[in-house]
Amino acid sequence: MTIVRPYGDTTGDGMVQLSFTLPIPYDKRAEGAALQLAAKMGMDPAMLVHSRQMGDGFTFFVVYGRVRHLVDTEQVQVVERDFPLLSAKEVNAAIKRGLRRRLSVVGACIGTDAHTVGIDAILNLKGIAGEKGLESYREMAVLNMGSQVSVPELVEAAREARADAVLVSQVVTQRDAHLHNTRALSAAFREALPAGRRPLLIAGGPRFDELMAGELGVDRIFGRGTTPREVASYLVHAVVEGTR
Amino acid sequence: MAGKLDLDPRVVRKARRLAARAGQPVVDLARSHTTVSVERAVLRLAGVRGADPDGIPWVNRLVDAVVADVGLEHGVSLPVFDALRDYGDITVLAQKAAAGAVRFRVPSSSHAARRTAVKFARVGLARVDRRRAERDRLIKRWGDPSQRPWIYLIVATGDIHEDIPQAQAAARAGADVIAVIRSTGQSLLDYVPEGATREGFAGTYATQENFRLMRAALDETSKELGRYVRLTNYASGLCMPEMAVMAGLERLDMMLNDSMYGILFRDINPIRTFVDQRFSRQVHARAGIIINTGEDNYLTTADPVEAAHTVTVSQLLNEFFAHEAGLADPQLGIGHAFEINPDVPESFRLELAHALLARELFPDAPLKWMPPTKHMTGDVFRGNLLDGFFNLAGAMTGQSILLVGMMTEAVVTPWLSDRDIALQNVRYVLGAAGNLHEDFVPARGGFIQRRAHQVLGEAIDLLDRIADDTLLNAIADGTFGIMRRPADRGKGLDGVAAHAGDYFNPVTELLEAS
Ligand code: B12
């Protein structure tokens, strides 16, 4: 069975909950408007269970209802891990064997983003979730440039460090800042270095769509809850084994 | 102090003594240096307005021109007011200077320039004084919030014209304080943008015109509500002193102003920050503005249990620096936060211990209580519960200013409905348990008391070490928020100069004389 429906309290009931705001004051018509939206979104029947006016011209709604849509789990598209998850020891051994030198990694938060906790979790010794960061890998040379680094600075540093991989973090997403900055990054590297000498480009942050790597011109995107080991294993896969 | 934690007053006095010993060298440093932003702030008070066609303010152009001719170490006031004789209008002088038409000198017999500078500075400070008196009058007319804590809400659309209706709606829904968060990146601009702005990222640019527009809108709403709604912005980043001046001129009521935030979280040079800090706090003191310190932030990069004492240390340092700059206790919105991982056993009791410790250490300060952020996740339902506990801890420990937590903290900058739900949460807790602090007395020798004593003890040990090793070294070593910031690095260092023997700053002179 690859076809499923949402589950409320009975298999196949298709029940979902939804909340939203409409820019109109509360009255009977507003309730009707909310139900109309729910219907257009495929909720049928829809139950308006809560509405509350906020300020002069806005109303907040909670709707429960049944959706007709079927989900086919076989047609889901995700970026699945297409490389083996290695231990630190295996990562170090693979680099030593494959590169015969240390793997050079340069990381930064670019643009005006000052959120370093995420990239630090990946790079710094301390790591996250019980896993140590890339700095703890004997066979990696890691330069963490910190936050609010400009793209030209990063390109320069990557060139100097002969980076095999450049890791950037983007946490602020308002007005698509993360997308603009990542595009600027990939464009700059394309311009500065010929294809063969360009480092692997990796972007990360909690609100990225991992499917957008190609569109943004980077090799890979890592999202929420990434651990250093996953990144290290990917680096082995892409740089050492040259599969990118 | 017959408090709820049985703190030994001698230990508390010792903590303050150590904070003063650790802080004094930094004050000495601040007193003997100036920065481009301090000098620009002086010129703003003296009345330089507007920007060139590229949006660079005339104060920047003027200071740059003076520095190019005679350097920064004398301060810009003597050269500028000496040159003013030939131009009459100070903004015209700035424009001419930018065009390269003025040669500045440090006048040798400087009496006339000095007198003119003091006269201009007096006029500027008189405007700040009038705004302060106006605030007092309006508070008398419209009244303060009827409850404590005051309810503090953030707006952050990036567009001042979108912010205004949101802020007004928030005030009508119960907010007592509105903070307009700044756009990312503004802290590192070495100038203040001009005019009304509509294009910030995750926040709205702080400009004098935006300040004015928002204050006017909130005045309208205050009148309508019969309650004075306060306005907050940020005196931080590379233009901290200028922000302080603008806030004084436009009657803002509170300003975020932490002694170390810029160093730790924006990598601004430590000396630049401390010099800017002292001047901005002197201006805030004069303007009757309540500062908010930023200890909550350390707990997002360091562990809130392990590093609890670093918050206490920073609070004591912030207090020392604030008093030294002339701020009174009712102006010290000392910050702290509910950031312990909810999976840690007894996390709520630990939070109560930390919150009560701050309350008892600073009994006359309007403490600013900050909500959970780091351990908020996409599970907004759980987030709303956590915010409820945060509100409850605030009520139980008598916090003064409560920054309303949003269940969508980990997802977006708050939506209209997020704010409404968050306010319902606050209202429920304050309505049901707002006076619980009257009954809440932790058991003698119990968990909460023991924890508070432990944190204070660790804070004293750390202060002891800092006092011996210097605060600048402690910051360099990553003592706060595990961020390492050496004193000879960071942004904005090239805009700092040690005072020459004839350094002169009319504003500092007037502020320190009063
Ligand atoms: C801590 C924090 C801060 C701290 C940052 C301290 C620091 N040195 O990093 C401080 C207080 C300084 C801060 C400031 C601001 N913040 Co903030 N902050 C947060 C907070 C609470 C937690 C973020 C965090 O540390 N998460 C923990 C880490 C471990 O998770 P992570 O970043 O997702 O990283 C993981 C993965 O995503 C991934 N990953 C991340 N990067 C990378 C990179 C690579 C290469 C890889 C492989 C993987 C990877 O791996 C990591 C480990 O699993 C969030 C809210 C929240 N709960 O999420 C808001 C939040 C991120 N902040 C926000 C905002 C708006 C700001 C400000 C702009 C506010 C303002 N206007 O002043 C300023 C930013 C100024 C600036 N110039 O950027 C918004 C962003 C909204 C948006 N989506 O655009 C949030 C979501 C809060 C909100 N709802 O408003 N903030």
Image (cartoon, rainbow, N blue to C red):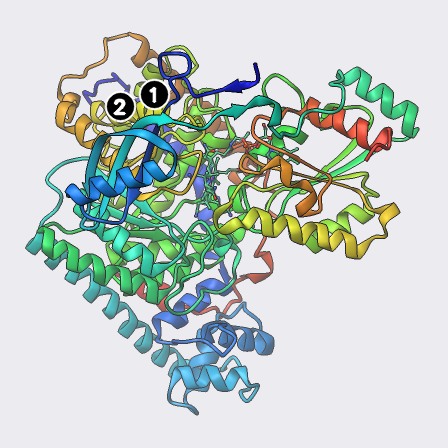
The extreme left residue here reads B141
Q: Quadrant of the C terminus of chain A?
A: top right
Same chain shared by disc 2 and disc 1: yes
Relative to B143, is B357 on the left or the right? Answer: right
- Which residue is labeled 2 in the image? B393
A32 vs A130: above or below: below
State if disc 1 and disc 2 touch (CB < 8 Å).
yes
Neighbourhood count class around disc 2 (C-alpha, 10 Å): few under 14, some 14–19, many 20 upward: many
| Callout 2: SS | helix
Residue A222 screen position, x and y as percent: 64, 33
Q: Is residue B321 in sight in this rendering?
A: yes
Q: Is residue B513 in sight in this rendering?
A: no
Q: Nearer the viewer, residue B28 or A234?
A: A234
Q: Chain of mark 2?
A: B
Q: Nearer the viewer, residue A49 or B196?
A: A49
Q: Give the residue drawn at x 70%, y 28%.
A: A231
Q: In the picture, residue B147 is in which quadrant? A: top left
Q: Give the residue drawn at x 21%, y 28%.
A: B398
Spatial CA distance of label 2 from label 1 is 7 Å
Question: Which amino acid type corresponds to the residue marked 1 in the rendered image?
Answer: Glu
B450 vs B200: above or below: above
Q: Give the residue drawn at x 86%, y 19%.
A: A93
- Which residue is labeled 1 in the image? B351
Q: Chain of mark 1?
A: B
Residue B502 screen position, x and y as percent: 49, 70
Q: Nearer the viewer, residue B393 or B454?
A: B393
Residue B326 screen position, x and y as percent: 30, 51
Question: Which amino acid type corresponds to the residue marked 2 in the rendered image?
Answer: Ala
Q: In the picture, residue B10 is in which quadrant? A: top left
